[in-house]
Structure formats: C-alpha cells, structure tokens
Image (cartoon, helix red, strand yellow):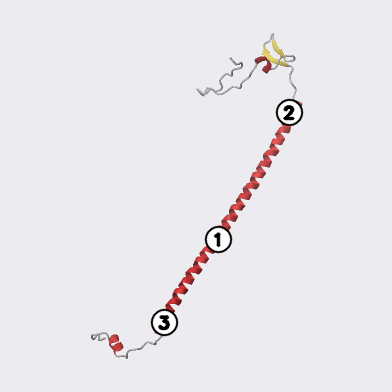
Amino acid sequence: MNRPESDDPLERALAGLPRAVASKDFTGRVLRALDRRRASASSRRLTLRWAVAGVAAILLVAALGLAIHRQRAAERAYRQELETLRSEYRSLVEEVATVRREATVPTRLHLGGDERVDLVLDLMGQPSIDEALGEVRPATLDARSDRGPSRPALRPQ
C-alpha cells in the first residue's frame, strides 16, 4: 500500500518503521480477550440482577411482616374494645335489674287539681293500657313534613 506523503511528522515517523508481523495466534487471543470481557460484563449484570432480586425479597418480607404486625395490633385493639363493651353491657344489665327490684309501683296517680279539688286516679285494679286500648303503636315522624311526631293510631280502624 502506497500512501501519499503526509505533512504530519508522526505519520512520517510511523511510515519509516518496518511493518510488524502479527503472531499466528494473534486473532485467537484477541477474540478470547473479547469473550472474557463479555463474560465478565454478563457476570456483573447477573450479579446485579441477583442483588436487586435479593433487595426486593427483603423489602417484600419486611412489608409482609409490618402488615402482619398491624393486623395483630388491630385484632388486639378490637378484642380489648369488645371486652370493654361486654363489661359495660353487664354493668348496665345489673343496674337495670337493681332499678327494677328497687322500683316501687305507684298505686295512685295525681292528675292535678286546684284549691278545692285534687284529681287522683287509683291504679289498683285498673286494666293495663294494653288491655284498655288494644293494639298500641309508637308515634312516628310525619314523612310529609318536619313538624315532629305525628299522632299515633291507638286502635286499628
């Protein structure tokens, strides 16, 4: 190969050197070195993938552990609240029973009056309100307005 003359001193110096002859195994050594570099890079990528997978697994286990811890804490709080409610319920049942035992039923009911007359109703021997009125229905809110409770129907008509 003839090269044209160059003004660059480095090229002139290199052109004056004898041509180097590569060894017989030069190409094989270059290809093996490239294979080693590819294998090393592949190995690094594989190592990085395993490291990422390991970190992901650790994070997953930590998140799962936190979720289990929170679930158990919520269950403990629920059980504690339930026991508190049951205790309050038992206390209220006992209190209602005590009030019922100690309550006295009046035999006379003062209805009012003035200076001359007192109106008193003797409750002994009177029929209960259920017996006297038949079916009793509770008052309900009037759905047509916000006036408050409507009058209950005391007897079926």
| Image coordinates for residue 61, horizontal then vertical, percent | 58, 58
Tell me which residue sits at (58%, 52%) in the image.
Answer: 67
Crowding near the residue tagged with mark 3, few <14, some 14–19, many ≥20 C-alpha atoms within 10 Å: few
> Where does the image place residue 132, in percent across and percent down from the top left?
67, 14
Name which of mark 2 and mark 1 comes first in the sequence.
Answer: 1
Residue type, mark 2 in image? Val
Outermost top residue: 116
Using the numbered discs, state the Cα–Cα distance from disc 3 to disc 1 in whole angstroms: 43 Å
Residue at the far right in the pictured view: 101
Quadrant in the picture for the C terminus: top right
Q: Which residue is mark 1?
A: 57
Viewer-nearest residue: 47 or 74: 47
Rate crowding at label 1 as few (under 14), some (14 to 19) or many (20 or more) other CA atoms within 10 Å: few
Side (left or right) of 74 relative to 127? left
Which residue ends up furthest to the left in the rendered image?
4
Query: Residue sitting at 65 percent across and 15 percent down?
Result: 133
The residue pinned by badge 2 equals 99
Q: Nearer the viewer, residue 26 or 49?
A: 26
Q: What amino acid is found at the position of numbered circle 3 in the picture? A: Gly
Q: CA gap, disc 2 to disc 3?
A: 105 Å
At which x and y percent is residue 123?
72, 15
In the picture of the structure, the residue carrying the numbered disc 3 is 28
Q: Secondary structure at mark 1?
A: helix
Total numbered labels placed on residues in the image: 3
- Report if the CB atoms under discs 2 and 3 are less than 8 Å apart: no
Give how far apart the Cα atoms at labels 2 and 1 are: 63 Å
